[in-house]
Amino acid sequence: MAGGIEAVFLSNREALLRFLRARGAGTDAEDLLQELWLKVSAAPARPVAEPLGYLYRMANNLMLDQRRSEGRRKLREFEWTARDTARPSGVPDITSAERVLAARQQVKAFEDALAGLGERTETIFRRYRLDGVPQGEIAREYSISVSAVEKHLQRAYRALVQLRGQLDAE
Amino acid sequence: MMVNEGEKVMTVAIGWVIRLRHADAREWEEFAAWLEADPRHLQAYEEVAAADEGLDALPPREVRAAEVAAEADVRAEPVPRRKVLGWAIAASVVGLAGYASLDTATDHYAVETIAGERRVVALADGSRIELNGDTKVALDRRTPRYARLERGEALFTVVHDASSPFRVEAGDADIEDLGTVFNVTRAGEVVGVEVAEGEVAVASGGQRAHLTPGMGVRAEGKRLTPSRRDPASVGDWKRGLLSYSSASYEQIAQDLFRNAGLGVQVDPELRERRFSGVIILGPDKSVLMARVAALLTVKARPAGEGWLLVPAEQ
């Protein structure tokens, strides 16, 4: 009874598996594909304009989630070690209030980095990334070419990648 | 040469993060092939994707000032950033619950759909918001009778409460329900409101309009342009119908993207043309484009990832 998106999944199984491997899933690729299938078959039926593109996006999101939870695991391990060595047991090293503050500092660092790019690049980047306005539309708004919009976006992303590198190194 | 090579890979990786926001299957496959070509490609992509993810935590500009004020007292002492923890902390807090959990003074969250997707949000007071594709609505758990349409289209079915009117903000426009079902669209700074039931007050740039069923308004900063629509057809997109009365082709192109994920550009030659009638959205994108072209008496040419509408005689 596989209909719609499920049928698309089944006939593109190999391509999706290949995508997950290329995306760094390694030996987990089959498991992740299974997870994707469960999500697809559990989701309420609704029209999807481009089902295969949608499946690729879901697969990519699985990989992004995976990396995020790895980050969380590392954080837990770190806390664990810190607690065992330096703190009386049961007292966490980092309180949740501190976490919230640290996260806010990250947000602030991002905002400062964007502001440092100059008004035009910042505004164009925010229009694209936060307001979700397509590049073509931004190009019309500013009467510049799509490739000029792309240049602004490239500059902004470059600065953010660099910022993140710095924060990671600290 | 080596440095240049790394720079080039980074440029391409950034290009992918930008393109993949609206990619179709073919582009995802090209992306996979690029990843397979060199292990450094995945590494560069992961780096950009990680930086990109952090952006989800950024509040939109207009709420920033208020939140900075709310933050000021909590942030008396800077927290020392610790090695390893910095990004992991941000990622875990943000990753779990979005920006909502970062703020103790408010409880903001956002609901978002991709093009072609639909979602229904049930609010605590019994009101309902139905989101069309490519739409983002920002909400606040502490202020349940309020929503902000960041972009796209949503149909609001609001439980009326005279003592606490439901407010929708969209760009410069402020929409207040006086008991109601109404539809709101936002594309950049242009906001459209249409009323199916009840009564709605719209204020934008100092101008005000009172709308009853069948009435609509298009707000662009200070300019309010009245429009009309059969109340029974308000929010028709929910049923897979796009109904128009002398709509510009630009507007139809926007609706096709939002509802069906179909990227459509309109040749400037067609700027003056208007369409009245109903487009029935079907499951098949390629057929849909052909049908729309026939209805609008234009030719649809493949262009990039989408289509370009040109006059039929061209």
Image (cartoon, coloured by chain):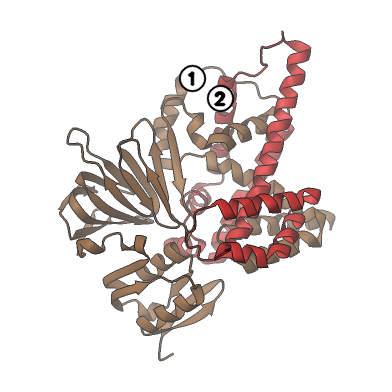
Chain colours: A red, B brown
Q: Amino acid at mark 2?
A: Leu
Q: Residues within 10 Å of mark 1 (few under 14, many from 20)?
A: few
Q: Secondary structure at mark 1?
A: helix
Q: Chain of mark 1?
A: B
Kindly give the residue lying farthest to the top in the view shown.
Answer: A88
At a point 58% along the width and 30% down the height, the residue shown is: A103
Residue B188: % across, % down: 39, 56
At a point 40% along the width and 57% down the height, the residue shown is: B132
Left or right: A75 with respect to B127? right
Q: Chain of mark 2?
A: A
Q: Is residue B6 visible?
A: yes
| Nearer to us in this view, B241 or A91 | B241
At a point 54% along the width and 33% down the height, the residue shown is: A108
Which quadrant does the N terminus of chain A fall into? bottom right
Considering only vertical position in the picture, is A14 above or below A73? Answer: below
Q: Are marks 1 and 2 in contact (CB under 8 Å)?
A: yes
Left or right: A80 with respect to B208? right
| Nearer to us in this view, B281 or B205 | B281
Residue underneath mark 1: B74
Q: Secondary structure at mark 2?
A: helix
